[in-house]
Image (cartoon, rainbow, N blue to C red):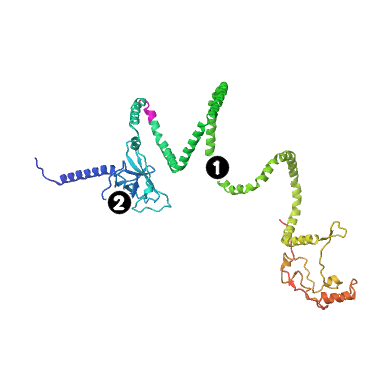
Amino acid sequence: MNPQKITVGRILAVFGFSVSCFVLFLVLWLSAGGPTPMKPKRYQVHVLLPNAKGLGPHSDVRVSGVTVGYVVRVDAAEPTRLGRADVLIELKRAVAPIRADARAMIRSKSILGEAYVALTLGTGDAPQVPEGGRLAPKQGLPSVLPDEIFETYDPKTRAALRTWMQTEGPAVDTRQLDLNAATGTLRPWAIDANGLLATVSRQNAQVSALLADGGAVADGLANRGRAIRELVNSGQTAFSAMGREGDSLAAFFRQLPGFERDAAATLRLLTRFSNANAANVRTVRGEVAPLSPALEALASDAPALRTVVDRTPPLEQASRAGLPAVDRLLAGLPPSLRALDPFLRSFNPALRNLGDGRDEALAFIANLAASTQSSTATPKGDEPLHYLRAMPVLNPAALGPLSRRPGVNRANAYPAPRSITTLDGVPSFDTRACGAPTPFITDPPSPDLTDAQRVQVRDYAFGGQPDSPPTPPCVAQAAGFPVLTPDP
């Protein structure tokens, strides 16, 4: 032994070597899946699985094939009193917390049986599972591992499987690349098959009914042997006919490659066209979407539309002569329209002014119709006798000639729209005569009235006051004289 003097450099070298060994050990520990020392615990939750075969501490926990955590411990290799193995898993905070409707099951990474926990996080509507909580037992789904399948084989089947596997070696000896390519496509197929089997599992009742119906169909086919034989004979006849047309089929298959080349070129052109117009199609789709309610509303009008479509061909025949005539008519319209322009510039303001009094016009038409629709039966029983209903107005101007406008007169040559509906009197355009007296019909007397009739008019029409009979209120109309100017 050669003792050496302890120096600061040697102490630093020993310290650096120790630290490097510790760091190397820590890297290997983390690579093997071990927990980081003194690291705060992540989100942990208990999962109850039907079995924990192949699981152990640090086994992966994956969501859609992505590792999001690991197994902390498996409390029971055999099912607990709940009928399940209690597996404690730890998840990253990015996926925590999971929901109460999350599901978990055991899957194998490879055929060697290395297992991991496949987890779904659940839906956003379900309640959250608190840290340290437990998923319901029904959320742990059963899984079938490869060794469980092999355990169902009897000794004879196992021997046959062993022989088959031994003979597979020479069979694939020169097919390594093909086998590798086929294995590369196995994962997408397995994912699709897993989705299909999951759907079948959810619809096990319907699948059972389908199998039962299949058995019934098989029994029915077994009872219809004669019909099946006739079907086979018919098929043989059909194939014989196809054999006689062998030359035509051969010509068809000779033409098929050219058709495929043309179809491929057409599809490429269609692909480029679709790629170039994808944005336009999306725009048109957004514009057409609001038309769906309108098209649904047209369902009740479908018979009428069908009638229109059926009558379109005669219309098309007639349009061959009619449309050229319409073209000639339209070609000759510009001079006429130009000649109408001055008239329309003056006529349009009159129409607008008439439109303001449309209520009075409608009332006039309605009153005219009501006054002319009365009829009565004739003594001979022939066609009914129509008569005009009218209400005469009794006023001094109608009973005798007057030398001046009476104060009872409310003249208005230009009534404002809806002025007749006012409750405070009929508006007058000119109110200068409102203060004038209302002379009676005695000067000069009406030659059409007797003295007795004049007395009756005085007593009953004018309330016994011939010099100042009752008069309506005098209200001046707010609107002035209508002035119409031509349009520019």
**Location of residue 281 (image quadrant):** top right
Label 2, residues with CA under 10 Å away: few <14, some 14-19, many ≥20: few
Q: Is disc 2 placed on a helix, strand or loop?
A: loop
Q: Quadrant of the C terminus?
A: bottom right
Q: Tell me the kind of residue under disc 1.
A: Val
- Asked if residue 175 can be seen in this view, the reply is yes
**Disc 2 designates what residue?**
41
Q: Quick check: is 215 in the magenta stretch?
A: no
Q: Is residue 122 left or right of residue 484?
A: left
- Asked if residue 251 can be seen in this view, the reply is no
Where does the image place residue 248, in percent across and percent down from the top left?
Answer: 57, 22
- In the rendered image, the vertical position of residue 345 relative to residue 243, given as above or below: below
Where does the image place residue 113, in percent across and percent down from the top left?
Answer: 32, 38
Label 1, residues with CA under 10 Å away: few <14, some 14-19, many ≥20: few
Sequence-wise, the earlier of marks 1 and 2 is 2
Q: Quick check: is 177 in the magenta stretch?
A: yes
Residue at 74% in and 67% down: 420
Label 1, label 2: how far apart the Cα atoms are:
53 Å
Are the two marked residues, 1 and 2, in contact with CB atoms closer than 8 angstroms?
Answer: no
**Disc 1 designates what residue?**
281
Q: Tell me the kind of residue under disc 2.
A: Lys
Q: Is residue 347 left or right of residue 13?
A: right
Q: Is disc 1 placed on a helix, strand or loop?
A: helix
Q: Is residue 270 left or right of residue 10?
A: right
Q: In the image shown, does 396 or 311 lie closer to the viewer?
A: 311
Q: Which mark is residue 415?
A: none
Where does the image place residue 310, in percent across and percent down from the top left?
Answer: 69, 41
Q: In the image shown, does 254 or 5 lie closer to the viewer?
A: 254
Closer mark to the observer between disc 1 and disc 2: 2
**Location of residue 392 (image quadrant):** bottom right
